[in-house]
Structure formats: structure tokens, C-alpha cells
Image (cartoon, rainbow, N blue to C red):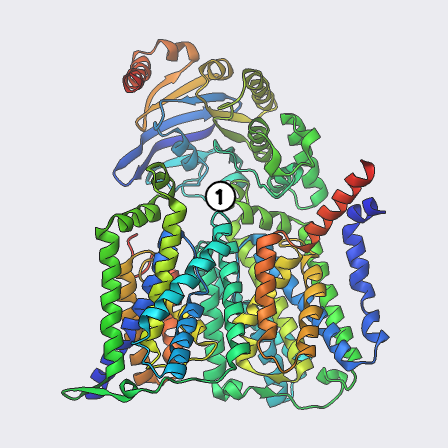
Amino acid sequence: MIKTFLKRQNAVLWIIAVASIALPLLTDNRYYQDIIIMTFLWTGLAASWNLYSGYCARLSIGHAAFLGIGAYAAALLYTNYGISPWVGMIAGGLLAGLVALVIGGSTLRLKGTFFVLATIAFAKIAETFAITAKWITGGSLGVLIPYAPGFINMTWQSKIPYAVLAWVYMLAILAVCVKVEHSRLGYFLRAVGEDREAAENLGVNASKIMLTAFVMSAVFTAFGGSIMAMYVMYIEPTSLMSMTNSVQFILLAIAGGLGTAFGPLAGAYVLVPLTNLMRGNFPSVSGLHGLLLGLILIAVLLYRSSGILPALKGFFEKRRKGDMG
Amino acid sequence: MMLLRADNITKRFGGVQALDHVSFEIAEGETVGLIGPNGAGKTTLFNCINGTLPIDSGRLYFCGNDVTGRKSYQMTALGICRSYQVVKPFRRMTVLQNATVGAFCREKSRKAAENTALEALRTVGLYEKRDEQGAVLNLGESKRLEIAKALSTRPKLLLLDEVMAGLLPAEVKAMSAIIKGINRAGVTVILIEHNMEAVMTLSDRIIVLNFGKKLAEGTAADIAADKAVIDAYLGTEEEENHAYN
Amino acid sequence: MEQLLQAFFSGILSGGIYALISVGLTLIFGVVGLVNFAHGEFLMLSMYIAYWLYYFTQLEPYETLLINLIIMATVGYIVFKVIMTRVLDADHSVQMLLTLGLSMVLQNLALMLFKADYRNVRTNITTDVINAGFLNLSTARVMAFAVAIAASVALYLFLQKTYTGTAMRAVAQHGRAARLMGINIKKIYGQAFVIGTVLVGLAGVLMSPIYAVFPTIGSNFSTLAFIVVVLGGLSSVPGAILGGLLIGVVESMAGYLLGPVYQQAAYFLLFILVLIFKPSGLFGRE
């Protein structure tokens, strides 16, 4: 059975991902439903991040900015102009893709550390813009989204439709990641991530490949941002585009296993409920969430730099050897 | 028609003249040896031919077309691919995946790319190792993987950079057979090699570089009798002996 | 015009402090090759130490300087021993993420222990002003500037003139060659890390009469220090000093000419432009 698990690991994880839609239906506790929705959303978001940074081995610590672009696009178009958030989501994706094209294109030449710093600066600029451009974004007060239930408004009274939406988002991103992993793009991305010169020698147009993945990653992240904004119904720029949010992308993907399609799922399914439950049980202690994220990040890097999935695999392989011996 | 024509290729690194007006021609189907003392500019010449380094002046013609200034991925698409002296396997990918990256240069679908890659792995004798990670190969296997990756791009011209360096005598023999087989299958080969015996027997022609200049060109017998070549090699040997004494 | 000059000089004064924060970061990056995202949290730590010492003893931060720096040196040493030594050979991104994790832990720990309140050290020097012609300069800022520049120059001289300093430069340029020459690399790494931490600790002491301390104060300054370090050409101490002054002036002038909200945006923009067009830094060599 363990052997089949190893062989069919992806199939098992697919089943877990698909079956988890049962979870929000099993409880009518809105608090648990909220955690489940956040888990779905963050799985999709971390997988989006992983698509570029995980496969390409280039760390973006600025993805919160793309999250923000998606969130603002949906929220502002809806709140100010009454445009359906579904349209806003598409608009946000397009805008994020465009921004990614500019940022990604101008930072292609930058080596590891410099690229990381550039992404941080990018997120800071986006945050500063959101706070200062009051006439567009509403400034540091943020955006309060009016409550008018209806499918067209992406607003519901029950949490179940949100859960379904987040679940569909997660499955769609995972499907794209699996598809990419087995395709030319995925092979090229990993090759570029390991050795850019060697990849180019094999005919890989590294710049084009990296840019493609960066834009895809940004667009998918922005979609998630739109859903998140409509679910929370409120945007607060400093926390939305904070470093902590940017790190959350990275932490979930790394904890699960970098550069594997299902790594972010493993990371998010374990860590999002864990950190949210902790925060929920000690609501008066501010800073606990960030502290936990930091500690987990350190622990993962020091003890299991390859992540949960490979570790699980290693565990099963050891067990199997033990069985035979 | 000549497959490759290099016309006065020149490359400078700061004050060092790495390549100084190097010209030569390679006919389709040939195996040409590129030899010369350390620092003669052999690897730099490879880097210039496959587009890894831009050349300062001179022109490069491939299949009759001017391809000067193309980037390395474009050169690969045209049909020039190289192997690296310092092996560069993709360490976190399997042997098959390594070669499949190259095969995707011509194939769109994964099935087709994998078939091309498997064929290349058979050619170099790594078929059995196809599911191993790139990181676990030993030196001889890594060198063969380098060739398999390059072969997977279906090159017309294959540039092999010291694929025998560090190999055991038996492995050198096997490698010679592999190269011969590749050439017989219709791929033109230029090889940089320090193993004189191997290069003399494999090559139809030999080009000698020294201090970035073409010193001599001809058959193995011509080169072995060439005064300038002997001086260049003996000269360096004398210096080396001096250094050791 | 007078106001413009006033803005320029207060920019120079802040720039001195930025320089001091950045030389510590530069030293750690140049010698150890470590991008230390927790550098700003070390600054925060030192400011809290200064604050609590002042709170309990009513002593000025300057008076508790020595205690503060000793604590900072100890913290630097422990962090290096317990965490950094384990990832010295690891990939750069692993190191970066690790220090990022450390910064989150320190920042949120401060939030849990001290709450998000702004805490001020209020002593005579806080409100003192020096009048030089039409210029009004805060005494604490002038003091901070003078000490910061002196300390940065002292670090430069230390690297140039002493044996340990020379060894650090050797390690910075050629780690492996330096090892062959018999230099104990790990020891040099440790020393550089501790010195860098002490320098940022000094900056914290100098800043505590000027800025209120709160848990996230470090993150503002650490991003700023990174920008300074890149502008300065990564591992050059004079470059970091010049970069610090430049950022101070850019920030202050942007604040005066465009409005305070554009201060940050101005230097981030400068940073991105430099990254794109001259990644070796404004003062770095190609």
C-alpha cells in the first residue's frame, strides 16, 4: 500500500484536494469554515508563487504586491463603479500580468540576491502607492466593500459559496501546475533554475521562459487576491501588502516542498490551520501569528530544507526498507 | 558547401587577446580535433561558436548563412550544440529529464521528446541509468550525460570539450567508440582534447591553437611533423619541467 | 532657499545614521557573504535596551552605551553560533530566508512583550537645539551624526590598518585562498558578524533620543540599509557611508519638495533604477 502511495503520490494528493470540498459542508461552525477557506486560498496562492520562484529557483519576496493588485482591482471597480467583481478579477489579473512583464523584464539580468532585493523594493513601492494615491485607492483607510449578496457581486451570506470558489481556484491552479510540470515549460523552468547557461546551450530561451512563468505567477496570484478581498470585504493596504504576507507565500511552498506541484498543498494544509487555530485560541496575543511563521520558517530551513512532501517520502521509504529487513 | 566557416574570429578579455583572427572551415561529416596548450583559447573558441560569448570582430557562417551574433539558444536551434568540460548536469532532475530538456528544443510533446532523449541515452550507454538523479552520476557518466543532452537537441555540429579528461583508459576507449558512432550517424564533430592518442585516431583533421592564434592545420601526420607545433608543445613542457624542478 | 538648505542639512544628519546602520550590514555581507534581514531587528533590540535602561534607571542612552553594546555583542555572538554557523555553506536563498525568519521572530516577540506602543526616551538632549546661523539642528541629531561618521571611519581604518581587518578583507575577496593562507575563516566570520551587530547597536543608542521605538521600527531601517548597501557597491565601507548620506538627502529633499509621503517612494525608485541600470552600485567598481 505504501508502495502504491509512493507511485501514485500525485493521484492521492489529487483525491485529497478534490475531496476536501466536503470539509466546509461537514461543519456549520463559521470559524472552522473560515479556516478551510483560507487554506484553499493560500494553497492556490502558494502554488502560484511556486510556479515561478519554486521551479526557477529565484526568490520573490514581493508577491504580496500582486495579491494587492488583484484585491484592489476587484474591490475598487465594484465599490466605486459597480462593476462585477468577476470582471474586476480579470482586470486585476491583466494589470498584474502587465506589471509583472515590466518588473520581470527589467530584472532578468539580476543575480539571486539582487533579484530578491528588487522584489522587496517592488512590494514596498506598491504599498507606498496604495497608501499615498488616495484618489484611487482610498489611502491608508483602505476599502470597505458594500454588502449586497448575489452571484454577480461575488458576495454571499453563507460561507459555503466562498469555500466552493476558493476550492475551484485552488484546483485550477494545481491543475495548471501539474500540467506545467509535465510540459516543455516545466522542464525548461527547472533547467533554467539549476543552470541558466547550460539550459540556454540546450536551446532554452531563458529570458522568455522566466518571463512567461513570472507573468503566469503574478496573474494567478492576483486572481487569488480578488477572491480574498471579496471574501474579507475589506482591504487594509499595510497588512495586505506586508512583508509577512509575502513571506507566507514562501513559507507554505518551502515547507511543502519547493518546485513540486503539490508541495504548496502539503504546506498550506498543515500550516494555515495550525497558525490560524493558534491565533484563534489566543486572540489577545498580537504577534503570535508572525512569531509562529518565523519559527516554522527557521525550523524548516534548519531541519528539513527539502520540505514536507519529500520528507514524507523519505519516511515511507525508510519504513519500507525496515519492513523488508 | 562548408558546414561551418569561421572568418577572422577575434575575442579580447581586457588586455588578453584570447582569440586572434582565427579562421577555419569545417566540412559536413568531418571529425576535427582542436588542440593546443592550456590557455590557447580552445574553450573560448567553443564559447564564441555556440554564442555563449559575443565575438569582438570576425564573422561566423553556418550552412552558408551568416550567424554572427546569435545567442546560444538560437545557435542550438540552428544545429550547433556543445558539451561542457566542467560537467553541468541538472542535479535535481533525472538523467532522462536532463536529456529531455535538450530534446524539447525540437519536439513539442513530452512523449516525442522523451523518445529522442532515450535514443540519445542509448547512444552514450546511459539508458539503464535513466531514472537516476543527475546529482548521483560519477564523472564518466556525467561526461556521457553531457553528450546525451547535446545529442538530444539533434545537432548538425557537435562541440565536445574535453570529454575524456579524467577518465580511466577503458572509459576513454568506450568514449572514442561513442564519438565515432555519433559521427558515423551523420553529426559533424569538433573535439577539444588533451589525450593525444585519442584525438589523433579520431580526427580526420586537426587544428592547433596557441596563444589565441591558429598555429597549424592538417592531418594527424602533418601535425605530428609540424615544427611550429612541436616547438609550442615542447616549449610548454620545458617550462613545466622547470617549474617542477 | 533657507528652508531648502535646512532640508539638505537635516538630510545629511539622518544620512550619517543610515551610514552607520549600513556599514554594519556591509561588513556582514562583504565578509560573511550573508544577507542579514534581521539587521533592522538588531537595531530595534538596541533601542529597546536603551529605552528600558532609561525607564528603570533614568540614565541617558549615552550613559548606558557600554552595557548596551555588550548585550548586543552577546546577542550577535549567540545568533551566529546557534544559527548562522549551520548555514554558512548553504545556498544564499536559504541564508536570506533564515535571517528573514529570525527578523519575524524578533519583531513579533517584541510585539508580544512590549505591545505596539511607541516608546520615547525623554531627556534634556531630546529637545536641545543647536543654532548655526539660520539653521536649527537638533543636538541629538548632530551628536548622532558625528559619532556615526566617526565609527564608520574607524571601521574603515580598522579594516585597512589592523591584522584582523586585513584578514577580513582577504576573506571577503577570496574565501578559499584566505583559508589556504592559514586564516581561520569561521572565526573571521564570527568576528565580522559581531562587529556588524555592535555597530548597528551603536546606531540604536544614537537614535533612541531621536526616534520613538516600536516593534516594527527595524523593518523600515533594514530595507533602507539594504538600499544603501547596494548603492554603495555591496562590500565597500566608504561606498556605504556615501550611500547613507545620499539616501538621507534624497529622502529629506523629496519630503520637502514633494511631501512627506513620497520620502520612501523616492528612494525605492532610486534603488530600482540603480538595480536595473547599474547593479554594481553607484559607488561600486564594475
Residue A163 percent location from the top left of the image: 76, 75
**For the residue labelled by badge 1, is the local secondary structure a helix, a strand or a loop?**
helix
**Quarter of the image where one finds residue B144:** top right
Subunit under mark 1: A
Left or right, A203 with reference to A325: left
Asked whether residue A312 appears in the rendered view, the answer is yes
Of residue C46 and residue A20, the one placed in the foreground of this image is C46
**Quarter of the image where one finds residue A147:** bottom right
Left or right, C148 with reference to A276: left
Asked whether residue C230 appears in the rendered view, the answer is no
Left or right, B27 with reference to B223: right
**Looking at the figure, which quarter contains the N terminus of chain C?**
bottom left
Q: Residue furthest left?
A: C133
Identify the residue at image location x=31%, y=39%.
Answer: B13
Q: Residue furthest front?
A: C57
**Quarter of the image where one finds residue C179:** top left
Q: Amino acid under label 1? A: Glu
Of residue C213 and residue C247, the one placed in the foreground of this image is C213
Q: Give above or below for B62 relative to C131.
A: above
Left or right, B78 with reference to C12: right
Q: Give above or below for C228 relative to A286.
A: above
Residue C161 percent location from the top left of the image: 21, 51
Residue wearing tag 1: A197
Identify the residue at image location x=55%, y=46%.
Answer: A194
Residue A201 percent location from the top left of the image: 51, 40
